[in-house]
Amino acid sequence: MVFSLILMNSAFAALVENKDYVMLEKPIEASPTKEAPIEVVEFFSYGCPYCYMLEPQINSWLAQKPDNVIFTRIAIPRKGKWVEYARLFYALGMISKQEQERITPLTYNAIHEQRLNFNDADEIFDWAESNNIDKALLKQFYNSKDVTEKLEQSVILAHSYHLKYVPSIYINGKYQLLIHSSNQYQDVKDKLNQLKQLIEIEEK
C-alpha cells in the first residue's frame, strides 16, 4: 500500500489539479475493453483550427500508444460545415477504420492548408475520390441512417461530458485533460502518459 502511494505521488508529481487536469463531478461510463482498460476520448472537428494544431501531438502520442489504451475520436457536428465534416468522418469509419485514419490528416490539410471550401457534399465526394476513396461507397454511407445515428450519439455524448469546447480530451470518463494552445499543446503527450500511469496504479 505504501509503495502504491509512493508511485501515485510520483505519477502526479508533474501534474496539478485544476491546472493540468480536472476530475469530472459525475464520471461518464467509458468503453474500455479487457485488453485495453484505459480509454482516451478526443472530441474534435476537422473544421477546428485548434484541433488541427493539436493533431501532431496526438499523432506523436499514438505512435507510442501502449496496447492497453484505446483511443476514440468523436467528431462534433456543432453547426454549418462542421456537420458535413462529422458526416465525412463517420462515413469514412463505415468504410474502414484504416481509411478513416488515412484520410484524417489529408482532410485537416485540405481545410487548413489548402483552404478548400467544401461548400457542399458533392465537393467533399469529389475531393475524397481524388484521394482514392470509393466515391459511390462514401456517398452510400454519408447520408445513411447509421451515420445519422452516430451524429446524434456524438451530441448526446457531448452533453453527457458537459463539453464546452474542442479539442477536449478525457480519460476513462473520469479525468479531463486541461490543454492549452498557447504552447501549441506541446505538453499533451506527457500529460496523457502521466494520467495513464495514475489509472494503472488506482486499479492495482
Image (tube, rainbow, N blue to C red):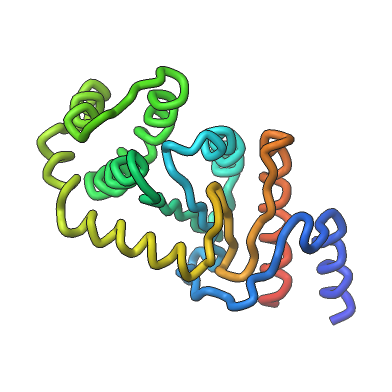
Q: Position of residue 178 (x, y in %)?
A: 69, 53
Tell me: 200 left or right of 168: right
* Quadrant into which the C terminus falls: bottom right
> Residue at 10% of width from left, 36% of height from top?
136
- Residue 35, compared with residue 108, is above or below; it is below
Tell me: 137 left or right of 174: left
Choose between 40 and 81: the one closer to the eye: 81
* Quadrant into which the N terminus falls: bottom right
Question: Would residue 98 be visible to someone looking at this image?
Answer: no
Choose between 198 and 163: the one closer to the eye: 163
Choose between 138 and 8: the one closer to the eye: 138
- Number of marks: 0
> Residue at 43% of width from left, 66% of height from top?
157
Question: Would residue 152 be visible to someone looking at this image?
Answer: yes
Quadrant hosting residue 137: top left
Quadrant hosting residue 81: top left
- Residue 204, compared with residue 96, is above or below; it is below
Q: Position of residue 120 (x, y in %)?
A: 22, 32
Choose between 75 and 81: the one closer to the eye: 81
Q: Residue furthest top?
A: 114
> Residue at 51% of width from left, 64% of height from top?
36
> Residue at 53% of width from left, 66% of height from top?
162
Q: Residue furthest front?
A: 80
- Residue 165, compared with residue 155, is above or below; it is above
Q: Position of residue 58 (x, y in %)?
A: 57, 41
- Residue 60, compared with residue 40, is above or below; it is above
Q: Position of residue 131 (x, y in %)?
A: 27, 24
Tell me: 22 left or right of 149: right
